[in-house]
Image (tube, rainbow, N blue to C red):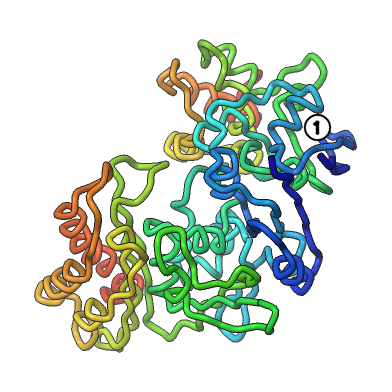
Amino acid sequence: MSRTHVSAVINGEPRDFLCEPQQTLLDVLRDELNLTGSKEGCGSGDCGACSVILDGRLVCSCLMLGVEAEGHTIETIEGLATGSKLHPVQQKFLEHAALQCGFCTPGLLVASKALLDRNPNPTETEARYWLAGNLCRCTGYDKVIRAVLDAAAVIRGEKSA
Amino acid sequence: MTTLTYQAPATVQDAVRILAGASGVAKVLAGGTDLLVQLRSGRVKPDLIVDTKKIPGMIGIREVEGGFVIGAATPGAVLGEHAALEKAWPGVVEAANLIGSTQVQGRASLAGNLCNASPAADSVPALIAAKATCVIVGPKGQREAPVESIVIGPGRTSLTRDEIITEFHLPKRPPRSGDAYLRFIPRTEMDIAVVGAGVSVTLDAGGVCRDARVSLGAVAPTPLLVPEAAAALIGHKLNQPTLDALDAAARKACKPIDDKRGTIDYRIKVAGVLARRAAAIAFERAGAHR
């Protein structure tokens, strides 16, 4: 089977990988690059557990082929923290206990970061609609939303982390 | 096991040549939010995928002579961020933005939504109501076709295997025009239309409808253009007799199926209701109450 050479910038670093044409970006991240933070929940774009940021835009990595990443910039959950310093959404998810089993958490964190990059002052309704494509079967979403709105206040500088 | 080949040509001519020369099953890739799901489930087993996104013009929006040219693979999120497009064609933008989640909006395109050929595609009734056309390129050159001529049955289009849609054209808006799209789903997000209704109107200075198009989704094997429903609006103001006539004409056009999303009777009833509500929004956007 022919493998294609792909170059992309992943979490700020230029990366090269070989992949088969039917491999999704999620397959590539997990199986070729050992970035196993992105999860496969449904494999059909319904659950959001595989969310990554592609050229500044939130996408499901299961709905993209690895070969489509050629020349693009990708941020995954592994790129959220700066060294040992957590991103405000990560910190607030911990403080608010916005996770239980944790499987949806990487996707929710990436999706929340994408929201706050774009709009650091979302209303609760905006946050809920933005995150409608991230399914969580444990939390009931309430703590998630509170954590995101609290992280937004930190990012706006109204509150310390 | 068949071997899948992926190609991302840099010109539309190369894309057409590759598709025309393909043996076996070839699929055109835009945003991929339907194709990747079908690929993974095994519902389609292509030998070749031709990615159109490296072709110049496939992603982006241009204003041309007062109308809009939308690249076929432009993601829904990009449509939603284009202020001039949203001002001129709010119904088209709201329909495209109803497709899937934020993540899906980052990829899903008008051409993909159209060529997936689902009877319930959200953007298609809005495009049909807007009198949108698509530019199709094939081995014999370029042609332009109305959006309502593309879907010919569930999962089937009128395109030949070596043709691709490159762009959509939305016409210039006359003054006092408005459009709207509404869909019914049993929740607020992340679902497939039970019924969808797109309405576009142009009014005269007195608020009388001078031109209209009405399109319904998920009530027949293809999205429908319903001239009888438009005729119920043209020559009339927005009042109860007009809305009743629209409701009746919309219901009469429906040929739905029973499925888990809704029964035949329910879909027909909802089609009339949504046509009325979408018409009321379109009239208001056209300035009927100002």
Question: Where does the N terminus of chain B fall, quadrant-wise?
Answer: top right
Which of the 4 image quadrants contains residue A32?
A: top right
Total marks drawn?
A: 1
Horizontal placement of A86 versus A140: left or right? right
Closer to the camera, B196 or B36?
A: B36
Closer to the camera, B252 or A54?
A: B252
Query: Residue A73 placed where, x, y %?
Result: 79, 42
Give neighbour class at mark 1: few <14, some 14-19, many 20+ (Cα, 10 Å): some
Closer to the camera, B88 or B219?
A: B219
Horizontal placement of A44 versus B274: left or right? right
Query: Residue A25 placed where, x, y %?
Result: 71, 37
Residue drawn at x 28%, y 75% is B226
Query: The residue under label 1 is which amino acid type?
Result: Asn
Query: Residue B3 placed where, x, y %?
Result: 74, 45
Q: In the displayed structure, would residue B225 be above or below residue A12? A: below
Query: Residue A13 placed where, x, y %?
Result: 88, 34
> Under tag 1, what secondary structure?
loop
Q: In the displayed structure, would residue B218 be above or below residue B207? A: above
Q: In the displayed structure, would residue B164 be above or below residue B262? A: below
Read off the residue under disc 1. Answer: A11
Q: Is residue B94 something one can see in this rendering?
A: no
Residue drawn at x 19%, y 76% is B238
